[in-house]
């Protein structure tokens, strides 16, 4: 029996690694938080063991021997908790100061939470580069996230990289984040914010600085113009079907600002806050039946005919 349980151990521990796990830190802030958690967890485990041992010992004695109540209360009830809690408080305060430091060379990204997706605006690029549900970071450089909400309270949390912080309407909160090496991580809204709270996720892509610079330069550019016939028809359909009332495609007349910026949509990996992979088929499905895929989200269904869906998906897919 024990041996069988031991066989299960690696499988259980493997659950701690991965692209959305606070137990698999990939940046300095996340590492400090993980260390603090482990120390607190170990301390709590020790206390549990100690209390259990004392309890068993008392239960197993045939003739109970009374202990000094005063000693018990003063040492175990006052001195021990005051010393350990004060030490933990001082230590966690120091960690907090370290991970919230804002060095001058930091990158600044404005993060907006909306029901139920994320917008990222890169302030270094004159605020021109705007993405949705996909945050890119240069490895090794601290990033200041300015968190705000357009509607209700959301919580920004990318467990592999930093702690979590609320996005509160009318207020700007700050969170520092830094990736230690390249990788793709997943974040999730951590405050129940309505029906599709569970489908309000994001990808964080940490890339080497030169690759990040190229990516940012590209995101600043206006959208690529339609080249083929289906792309031209897709662009036309986009303007005619009313998509432009909500969505912006920089460099075109589409100027909506209540929905994800689609200027470089083709370069993104997912659709609708990491709900679907970004593919030609999923894109058509999303346009035709967004309400079926993510009920109550702020985009209506567009029951368009096959050729129009094909043209729209081809056009949007070309916007890299
Ligand atoms: Cu949310």
Image (tube, rainbow, N blue to C red):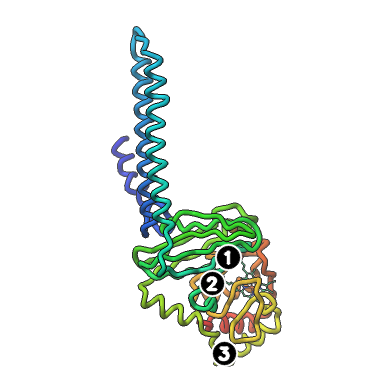
The number of discs equals 3
- 315 is higher (above) or lower (below) than 101: below
Occupied quadrant, residue 6: top left
Occupied quadrant, residue 211: bottom left
Mark 2 or mark 1, earlier in chain: 1
Residue under label 1, please give it: 112
* Disc 2 crowd, CA 10 A, few/some/many (<14, 14-19, 20+): many
Q: Position of residue 3 (x, y in %)?
A: 29, 38
* Residue occupying image coordinates x 68% and y 61%: 296
Does residue 265 appear in the picture of this structure?
no
* Disc 1 crowd, CA 10 A, few/some/many (<14, 14-19, 20+): many
Q: Are marks 2 and 3 in contact (CB under 8 Å)?
A: no
Q: Disc number at residue 121?
A: 2
In the displayed structure image, the side of residue 232 where residue 1 appears, left or right: left
- SS label for mark 2: strand
Residue under label 3, please give it: 226
In the displayed structure image, the side of residue 126 where residue 59 appears, left or right: left
Q: Position of residue 41 (x, y in %)?
A: 38, 40
* Residue occupying image coordinates x 70% and y 84%: 240
Q: Are marks 2 and 1 in contact (CB under 8 Å)?
A: yes
């Amino acid at each position: 029996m024990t041996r069988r349980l031991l066989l299960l151990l690696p499988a259980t521990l493997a659950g701690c690694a991965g692209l959305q796990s606070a137990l698999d830190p990939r940046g300095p802030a996340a590492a400090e938080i993980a260390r603090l958690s482990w120390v607190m967890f170990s301390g709590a485990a020790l206390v549990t063991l100690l209390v259990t041992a004392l309890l068993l010992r008392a239960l197993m004695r045939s003739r109970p021997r009374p202990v000094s109540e005063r000693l018990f209360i003063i040492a175990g009830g006052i001195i021990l908790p005051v010393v350990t809690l004060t030490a933990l408080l001082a230590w966690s305060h120091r960690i907090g100061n370290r991970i919230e430091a804002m060095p001058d060379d930091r990158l600044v990204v404005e993060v907006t939470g909306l029901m139920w997706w994320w917008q990222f605006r890169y302030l270094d690029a004159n605020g021109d580069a705007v993405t949705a549900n996909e945050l890119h970071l240069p490895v090794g450089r601290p990033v200041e996230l300015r968190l705000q909400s357009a509607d209700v309270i959301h919580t920004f949390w990318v467990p592999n990289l930093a702690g979590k912080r609320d996005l509160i309407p009318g207020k700007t909160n700050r969170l520092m984040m830094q990736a230690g090496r390249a990788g793709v991580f997943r974040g999730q809204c951590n405050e129940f914010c309505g029906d599709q709270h569970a489908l309000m996720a994001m990808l964080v892509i940490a890339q080497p600085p030169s690759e990040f610079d190229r990516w940012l330069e590209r995101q600043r550019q206006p959208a690529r113009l339609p080249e083929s016939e289906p792309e031209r028809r897709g662009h036309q359909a986009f303007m005619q079907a009313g998509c432009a009332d909500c969505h912006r495609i920089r460099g075109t007349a589409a100027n909506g600002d209540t929905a994800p910026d689609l200027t470089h949509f083709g370069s993104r990996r997912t659709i609708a806050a990491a709900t679907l992979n970004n593919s030609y088929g999923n894109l058509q499905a999303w346009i035709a039946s967004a309400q079926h895929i993510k009920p109550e989200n702020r985009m209506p269904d567009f029951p368009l005919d096959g050729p129009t869906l094909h043209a729209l998906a081809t056009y949007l897919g070309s916007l890299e």
